Image (cartoon, rainbow, N blue to C red):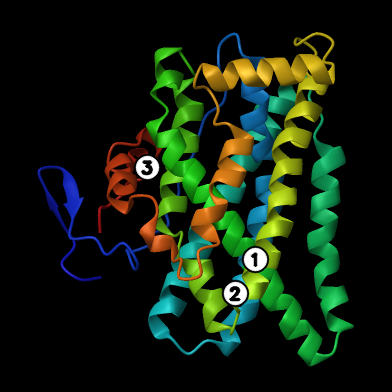
Amino acid sequence: MGDVRVEDGRLVGLDERHPPIKTRRVAFDWEKTPLHWIPNDPVGTHLINAFHIVLPAGERWFIQCVKDALPDLTDERLKEEIKGFIGQEMVHARSHQGVLDQLLEKNGIDTRKITDQMNKGNDDRPGERAKMSARKARWMLKFELGAVASIEHYTAVFGQWIMDAKALDEDGADPTMLDLLRWHGAEEVEHRSVVFDVYQAMGGRYPMRVATWAVSLFFLYWALFGGGYYLAGQDPTAGKMTKLRFLRAYRRSVRQGHIPGVFKMLLGEAPVYLRPRHHPSRVCSTQQAVDYLLTSPAAQAAGYDPY
């Protein structure tokens, strides 16, 4: 871990490439959180709520991919980082499932059309892998790791964005939801290098990294816009939601600083992630992430010990 210590309430001496990765067993109470937790912005709310739909199953897929790679890894530090990564992702999955069960479902929004499909993909994966030859199964695992690594890049970038999104505070966004998103985002920044390092350790090469980035780009576009539009259409309080109305409301939400520009973020990060010598440790700020975790209500309530 190096000389990591607390000075003046801040954690200093961090290694951006290999920070300590700790599991924080947080909990959230959604009893007082309104459905439109960004006031007067149902579309902005539901675009971010789309993360809650895909993340529980998505996080379980991420975990399984790195678990499948473990037998082939020899770097003991990377194995230790994987343990921290798995612990964090398990809590992420549970926390976002809580939003589905305790906030969206309570307000008449049924997400099972999407979540059942994603859960089925996870359930079918072992059987499909068992039918493959060892060589094809290893190739497929590397491809999946490449896709997860590129998604992890975007979740870290979004995590950095949500920590900086002061307009949400100024416009009265629900503090519990903001803490969930910022705690999660901070941990995404913290462990952003792990899956990329696993991909490289498994022999993943640059051409596959480009191909898996393209696949993940389509997935993220579908997850955010498709999921957001689906939720807005399910919302009994949002009125009739046409595609044109949704797009106009999306643009207004971006101008207000309630959500990032999805196209700008997805395509704007391409030159960064696709740089041949790219490494995740060169983007985002671990220092800012742990500084937030030192003040996060949920992390503090969980007894977060700064290393």
The numbered mark, 1 or 3, whose residue comes first in the sequence reads 1
Quarter of the figure that contains the N terminus: bottom left
Amino acid type shown at disc 1: Val
Residue behind mark 3:
299
Amino acid type shown at disc 2: Tyr
Quadrant of the image occupied by residue 221: top right
Q: Nearer the viewer, residue 55 or 253?
A: 253
- Residue 183 lies, with reference to residue 76, above or below; the image says above
Structural crowding at the residue carrying mark 2, measured as other residues with C-alpha within 10 Å and reported as few (<14), some (14–19) or many (≥20):
some
* Residue 92 screen position, x and y as percent: 55, 49
Q: Which residue shows up at 59% across the image and 72% down it?
A: 66
The numbered mark, 3 or 2, whose residue comes first in the sequence reads 2
- Asked whether the residues under the numbered discs 2 and 1 touch, taking CB atoms below 8 Å apart as contact, a structural biologist would say yes
Amino acid type shown at disc 3: Ala
Q: Which residue shows up at 44% across the image and 66% down it?
A: 279
* Residue 211 screen position, x and y as percent: 70, 66
Residue behind mark 2:
206
Structural crowding at the residue carrying mark 3, measured as other residues with C-alpha within 10 Å and reported as few (<14), some (14–19) or many (≥20):
many
Residue 1 is left or right of residue 204, and the answer is: left
Residue 210: which disc? 1
Q: Which residue shows up at 44% across the image and 61% down it?
A: 280
Q: Is residue 184 visible?
A: no
Residue 262 is left or right of residue 238, and the answer is: left
**Dot 2: what SS?**
helix
- Tell me the distance, in whole angstroms, between the alpha carbons under discs 1 and 3: 36 Å
Q: Nearer the viewer, residue 297 or 167?
A: 167
